[in-house]
Image (cartoon, rainbow, N blue to C red):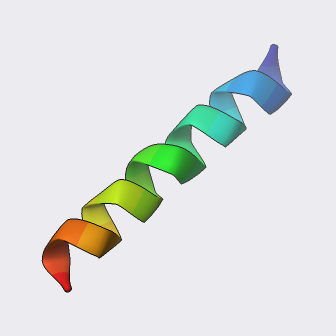
Amino acid sequence: MCSRSHVIGGVIENRTRLFSI
């Protein structure tokens, strides 16, 4: 469960970074 939450957070951060650039 913790691993899944961490993966989702990473994906969200990656998307935010792409949008920021």
Instruction: From the viewer's side, name the closer residue of 18 and 6.
Output: 18
| Extreme residue in the top direction | 1
Residue 5 point in image, percent of width and height: 65, 26
| Extreme residue in the bottom direction | 21
Horizontal placement of 9 versus 21: left or right? right
Q: In this view, does 17 lie above or below 2?
A: below
Residue 17 point in image, percent of width and height: 32, 72
Residue 21 quadrant: bottom left
Q: How many marks?
A: 0
> Which corner quadrant holds the N terminus?
top right
Horizontal placement of 17 versus 7: left or right? left
Q: Is residue 10 above or below residue 16?
A: above
Residue at the spot 41% in from the left edge and 46% down from the top edge: 12
Residue at the spot 68% in from the left edge and 39% down from the top edge: 7
Residue 9 point in image, percent of width and height: 53, 42
Residue 11 point in image, percent of width and height: 52, 47
Residue at the spot 16% in from the left edge and 77% down from the top edge: 20
Horizontal placement of 6 versus 13: left or right? right
Horizontal placement of 3 versus 17: left or right? right
Residue at the spot 45% in from the left edge and 62% down from the top edge: 14
